[in-house]
Image: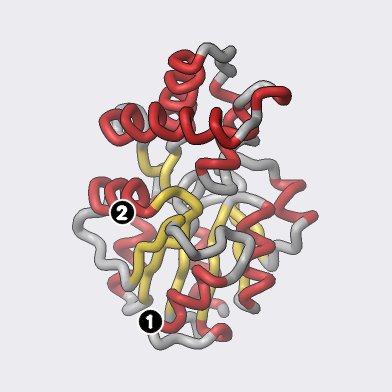
Amino acid sequence: MIKLVIFDLDGTLLNTIQDLAGSTNYALRQCGFPEHETEAYNYFVGNGIKKLFERALPENERTSENIEKMKRFFLAHYTQNNTCLTRPYPGIPELLEQLRLRGVALAVASNKYQEGTEKLVRYYFENITFSAILGQREGVPVKPDPAIVKEILSLSGVTESETLYVGDSGVDMQTAMAAQVVSAGVTWGFRPRKELEENGACHLVDSPAEILSLVSRL
């Protein structure tokens, strides 16, 4: 029986790609580097903001100094603009409400920095209670390391066998596997279905409503 559903954030609950692309392109522009089309960011995101900057920078400019410079510009811009174009995927608010009504605990595990993760979850899902909202923090390894999932299990008092992890990328499927929890890969996110399959997704879902059905069956 599933008692806890842990969601990835970007590409799973929220379509954040346009705001992420806009703020990263702003940082690139301020640093004098070429920008990218929004679609390219589907493959730049997912491993934390430092990896995002590393992927966005020209190959011969991926220095620690440039990454830190990018980070300063990005954070200043994204903090002010991260709700401009970001929206929940269709059916997500209804899914969260239905899970809540069924007594299923909810949590978020993201590689987005902690402040941004909390802000977006509170902003878009203000009426939903989450047992944990965790993002990237100093001293905590990013996904696919299972540390963030293990922390949520501890905070929630739920076991691995009672947990479903939902995400849109290979990193998410690897995280679930490392944490020894059941995974569901969503096909509406940033990465293709094939990536989810190749990284060991236990289940694939094409709509939020399918997650509700999956929780009922497990």
**Residue at 33% over, 65% down:** 98
* Relative image position of residue 197 (x, y in whole percent): 76, 55
* Relative image position of residue 193 (x, y in whole percent): 70, 46
Q: Secondary structure at mark 1?
A: helix
The quadrant of the rendering that contains the C terminus is bottom right
Residue that mark 1 sits on? 156
Few, some or many C-alpha atoms within 10 Å of disc 1 (few <14, some 14-19, many ≥20)?
some
Amino acid carrying mark 1 in the image = Ser
On residue 118, the disc is: 2
**Residue at 50% over, 68% down:** 148
The quadrant in which residue 58 appears is top right
* Relative image position of residue 49 (x, y in whole percent): 51, 42
Above or below residue 16? Residue 136 is below
Few, some or many C-alpha atoms within 10 Å of disc 2 (few <14, some 14-19, many ≥20)?
some
Above or below residue 129? Residue 199 is above
Q: Nearer the viewer, residue 34 or 84?
A: 34
Amino acid carrying mark 2 in the image = Glu
Real-space Cα separation, disc 1 to disc 2, in angstroms:
17 Å
**166 to the left or right of 5:** right
**Residue at 33% over, 27% down:** 77
Tell me if label 1 and label 2 are in contact, CB under 8 Å.
no
Q: Going by the picture, which residue comes out furthest to the left?
A: 127
* Relative image position of residue 180 (x, y in whole percent): 65, 78
Q: Secondary structure at mark 2?
A: helix
**Residue at 62% over, 25% down:** 57
